[in-house]
Image (spheres, coloured by chain):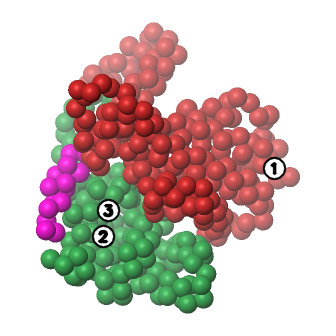
Amino acid sequence: MQPESLSFIFLNAFLINNFVLASFLGLCPFVGVSGKLNTAWPMGVAVIFVMLVASVCAYAINSILVYFGIEYLRLIAYIAVIASAVQLVEMTIKKFSPTLFRLLGVYLPLITTNCAILGMALFQTFNEYNFVQSIFYSLGAGFGFMLALVLMAGLREQLEFSNLPYVATSGAVAFMLAGLLSMVFMGFAGLGG
Amino acid sequence: MSSASKQDGPITYETFMSGAWKQNPVFSRLLGLCPALAVSNTAVNSLVMGLASSVVVICSSIIISLLRNVIPKQIRIAAYMIVIATFVTAVDYGIHALSLELYDALGAFILLIVVNCMILGQCESHASKHRVTTAAVNAGGTAAGFTAALLMIGSIREILGFGTFFGITVFGEGFQTWAIFVLPPGGFFVLAVWLIIFAMVQRRKEMSARPQSARSGKEVVHAT
C-alpha cells in the first residue's frame, strides 16, 4: 500500500498506530468509561462523531490561519472548536436519551479534554493531509478509540467476577490489561507493508 | 475579597504536600496520564515534560485565581481553557527556541499539555476557589507531584529499556536491554507497578493510624 493512500491512512490510525494503545492518547476516558460495555459503545460513537466534526473544522480553520499567517493561534482555535462540538453532542444526547446522559455523566463534557481529539487535529495538520485524507484519518482514529474502549470494557466485565488482591483495585489491573492489549496491537505493525 | 477566600487558612506545609503526595495527580487521582506515559521513555524527556507542565499549571492557577470573581460561572471551563492554551503556546515556542532536539523528541505532546486533565482539574477544583498565594502554593505542590511521578516512570523505563540513566550507562557491557519498556506496553506495565506500590504504602499508613479493633474489622471485609 502507498503511504498516501486512503486505506493506509485509515488503517494506520485504526490499528497500527492505535491512538489509545500505541500513542497513549485519550487514556482518561479509556480508564474511566471502560467499566461497562453498555457505556463503552455510546462513548465510542460520541467520540467518533466529535472526531469527524473536529477534523473538518480543524482543516477549515488551519487553511484560514495559514492564509493570514497567524499559526500561533492554532491551539486556541482548535480548543474552542472542539469544546463547541462536544457541547453540541452533549445537548443532542441529553435531548434524545436522558438515561444515556446520566450513564456517561461527567465523562461526556470531559471529551473536550480528551487528548485523542486534539491530538488527531494536530497530527492531521502536521502531516499536511488534504481534506479527504483528514476525514479518513479522523474516522480511523475514532474507530480505533472505540475498538480499544470496547475490548477493554469486555475484559473488565469479566474481571468483575474474579477475586483481586486489594492493592490492584485502584486501576492497576486496568493498566496491566491495557499493557497486554498494547502488546497485541504491536502485532499490527507489519500490516501496512 | 469573596467569602471563600476568608476561609483560607495560612499557607502551611500541608497546602503544598496535599498536592504533591496525598492528592498526587498521577498515582492517586489518575489524572494527566497521557503525557505521563507517552513521553516517559527516557528520564530527560520526563523531566522536561514535567517542568513544562509545572510552568503551565502554576501560571494558569495564578491567573485564574486572580480572575475568579470576574469569570462567569457558566463559561468558566471555556475561559480556563483559553488561559491554559495561552501558556501552553508560550511554553511550546519557548522549548522550540531553547532546544530543537527536545522539541523533536516531545513533538505534539507539548501542545497536548493543554488537554492534560491534571491542569484543568487543578484550576477547577482549587485555583477558582482560593486566593492567589494559596492557589500558587497548592499548584506548585501538584506540579512537583506530577514531575516526580513522571520522573519515577521515566527513570525505570530508561534504566531497563536502554540501560542508561540521564544518558549515563548504568549497567556493564553484558546487560541485555529490555526493549519492551521503551515501547508502549512497557509504559502501561511500569505505571501499573507504581500504582500497586503506591496503594500498598497508603494502605500501610492507614493501618498504622487505626486502632487495633478497627484494623481487624477491615481485614474481615476484605477477606469475604
- Which mark lies nearer to you, 1 or 3? 3
Q: Are marks 3 and 2 in contact (CB under 8 Å)?
A: yes
For badge 1, the amino acid type reads: Ser
* A75, B123: nearer the viewer: A75
Q: Residue at x 64, y 63 (%)?
A: B90
Question: Magenta segment: does it hold A38?
Answer: no
Q: Magenta segment, principal secondary structure?
A: helix
Residue pictured at 46% horizontal, 63% vertical? B108
Which residue occupies 46% across, 25% down?
Answer: B202
Give the colour in which the image draws chain B. red
The amino acid pointed to by label 3 is Phe
A17 or A26, which is in the foreground? A17
Label placed on residue A19: 3
> Does the CB distance between marks 1 and 3 fall below 8 Å?
no
How would you rate the neighbour count of disc 1 (Cα within 10 Å): few for under 14, some for 14-19, many for 20 or more? few
**What residue is disc 1 on?**
B3
Question: CA separation, marks 1 and 3?
Answer: 44 Å
Mark 2: which secondary structure? helix
Q: Amino acid at mark 2?
A: Ala
Q: In the drawing, what numbered circle is on residue A141?
A: 2
Q: Which chain is green?
A: A
The answer to whether residue A186 is magenta is: yes
Which of the two marks, 2 or 1, is nearer to us in this view?
A: 2
Specify whether B82 is left or right of B166. Answer: right
Taking the view exactly as shown, the residue that stands out farthest to the right is B1
Residue A142 percent coordinates (x, y)? 31, 71
Which residue is located at x 77 percent, y 61 percent?
B67
Left or right of A160? Residue B166 is right
Q: What segment carries the magenta color? A: A176-193
- Location of residue B177 in the rendering, given as x and y in whole percent from the top left corner: 25, 35
